[in-house]
Image: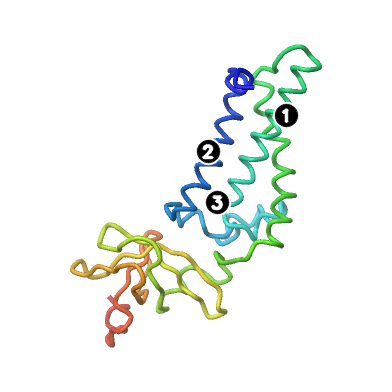
Amino acid sequence: MLEFLGAGPNVAFVVALVTMLLIGVLEAIGLGSSALGHDLGADGDLHWLDWLGLGRLPLLMTLVLFLAAFGTIGLVGQQFALDHLGGLLSPAIAVPGAAVAAWPVTALLGRVAARIIPRDETSAIGIDQLVGLTGEIVVGRATRGSPAKARVRDFHGQSHYVMVEPDDAALAFAEGEQVRLCRLENSIFRAIPSGRADFSDWISR
């Protein structure tokens, strides 16, 4: 088995599966990229992927599904070739073939997953509409230049996970602290303590 997995024509598929596992580990310990947590379709230029059934899944979940499908299909295909053709297929044939075959499988898995996975990370509203709302720091310690992950509930009660840093460089937010989002800059929300009474002054800066 190890000889099969370590064979040159199978490297791409093994790397895909290992990457999938690493993403899972990073997400489990809270180090995954929040930018990849937004839904496909949250931005207008991604709506074309709706036909695949992926418009309601976080981008990171879709990537994991594709890596799993690509790696599995590739290795199964190579095992079939080894058993029935007497040798492994060239990567020039196996990799594109597995990638093409993985798309419909990813679409199928995505449609199933979208129905059963709770939509904690959602973009039912535009991400900029979160400005003015209150959130809670859930992973990390937020300082200027070192954002932390925060959970924000929108007007519909749905949760969004965003990266937050203090608007005031002298401030820092610890896990469990409540903050108020005052503006969005380069996918990072600037925030102030939730109890600040002069919020209108901050948001107009």
Q: Which residue is mark 1?
A: 76
Q: Nearer the viewer, residue 26 or 106?
A: 26
| Residue at horizontal 59 percent and vertical 55 percent from the top | 46
Give the residue type at disc 1: Val
Q: Nearer the viewer, residue 70 or 118?
A: 118
Give the residue type at disc 2: Thr
54 vs 142: above or below: above
Residue at the front extreme of this rendering? 1
Locate the N terminus and report the quarter of the image it occupies: top right
Q: Quadrant of residue 15?
A: top right
Q: Which mark is residue 60?
A: 3
Q: Which residue is mark 2?
A: 19
Mark 3 or 2: in front is 2
Rendered location of residue 155, percent (x, y) = 53, 80
Q: What's the distance in space between the residues labelled 2 and 1, CA to CA?
A: 18 Å
Question: Quick one: label 3 or label 1, which is nearer the N terminus?
Answer: 3
Asked which secondary structure carries label 2, the reply is helix
Q: In the visual, does 185 lie left or right of 9? A: left
Rendered location of residue 133, percent (x, y) = 42, 78
Locate the C terminus and report the quarter of the image it occupies: bottom left
Rendered location of residue 11, percent (x, y) = 57, 24
Give the residue type at disc 3: Leu
Asked which secondary structure carries label 3, the reply is helix
